[in-house]
Image: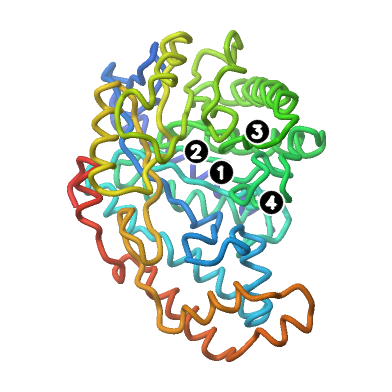
Amino acid sequence: KIAMRRYIWKIICIVLAVALSSGCGNKVGFIKVNGTSLITPDGEEFFIRGTNLGNWLNPEGYMFRFPNSVNSAYRINDGLCEMVGPGYVRDFWTTFVENYVTEKDIEYIAKTGTNTLRIPFHYKMFTSDRYLCFEEPADGYELMDKVVGWCRNHGLKVILDMHVCPAGQSGDNIDDSYGYPWLFVDQKAQDLFVDIWAGLAEHYRNDPTILGYDFMNEPIAHYFEDKDMLNANCVELYKRVCGVVSEIDPNHILIIGGVQWNGNFAPFEGVDFGENVMYTCHIYGCYPAKGSIGHFLKFRDSVGKPMFMGETGENTDQWVHDFRVAMEESGMGWTFWTYKKLDNERGFLNIARPEGWDSIIEYLGSDRSTYADIRDARKDQALYRNALDSYLKNCLFENCKVNEGYISALGLNP
């Protein structure tokens, strides 16, 4: 049954791609790398202006205003299960995935003038490990096909971003890991990583809505003493996945993120990852001027390949405006982080804080080291559930507040 569902979705995807290609002449096709630029099938430059669908398929605690002790997907899930039980939490995640991003969100994003969406996802979506509301690979493909279809309908390009890789690629909360980038020392995890990307490449190879494959988000945090060894292993894994994916899918762009939070490209100097390759950098909290990206531009120009800013932002509207202008003047496209958050104006949309939300934060921030501590900390389950139910309503597009100043700072139309 699962295999049949995946097969049907694959056929639908192929039929749509063929129909689009045959019906629109040379205006529909694959964006390609041309020197340090991206070029459309018509030979025009494509400049990435976009946002990230952060928190949706890889929940992060700070976007719920949760304490630092509950800052990754599995820690959030464990804490909620303690509060309200695993049965409720399974239903919560199902509705969360359904509500957090709908076609109304995609339609609105496109209307602002955005042309690209970077979609962060957890590798478990494409395995048989239960995660959020996903139980089989077919579930992950079905959801991703749905949002890619929405983007196709509204003229957006999609970057698929494996934000969480098997065993963890960063060694911190953002990769839902156990405090070390185990991916680079675990052969089975590397095999799974390559297999998942091979499956995605096979599935989407004929779909021009996909701009490219962002293989791993922010590999290898800077504070590991053995990072030189990890960096070298990362280069080899990038080479391996690029070779496998380009053999299956020669159409889409292969996207390489720098080590140390997508900030260090020195290990990639002199490495040939292929022809249709683009690099991606991330930076936060810098001075919003060209000088802050000078080292990225130097690497870009030395290798003769495009470089885009996959993540930045989380700052004031003035900072966002100034840094966006600096990147555009430097020929660097961008996808700012991130589209939607709770009680925060540093994104396209603001989700209102539900009544009773502080009680959830209080519980999650309490000492829960033992089962006795859990029992002592847990208070009114009805209050917790009501607050969570309200969040699921508040996160719907129609119930969010548009942050017009932020969107205008991006040069877009709120």
CA gap between label 3 and label 1 equals 14 Å
Q: Which is more foreground, mark 4 or mark 3?
A: 3
Q: Position of residue 10 (x, y in %)?
A: 56, 43
Q: Look at mark 3 in the image and give the residue it sits on.
A: 198
Q: Type of residue at label 3?
A: Ala
Q: Position of residue 385 (x, y in %)?
A: 53, 84
Which quadrant is home to the N terminus?
Answer: bottom right
Residue 119 is marked as none
Vertical comparison of 107 with 237: above or below = below
Query: Do callouts 2 and 4 mark residues in contact (Cβ within 8 Å)?
Result: no
Q: Type of residue at label 2?
A: Ile
> Mark 2 vs mark 4: which is more N-terminal?
4
Q: Position of residue 166 (x, y in %)?
A: 71, 43
Q: Look at mark 4 in the image and give the residue it sits on.
A: 3
CA gap between label 2 and label 3 equals 16 Å
Q: Look at mark 2 in the image and give the residue it sits on.
A: 14
> Mark 1 vs mark 4: which is more N-terminal?
4
Q: Look at mark 1 in the image and give the residue it sits on.
A: 10
Q: Type of residue at label 1?
A: Lys
Helix, strand, or loop for circle 3?
helix
Q: Which is more foreground, mark 2 or mark 3?
A: 3
What residue lies at 73% left-to-right and 51% top-to-bottom?
Answer: 178
Q: Type of residue at label 4?
A: Ala
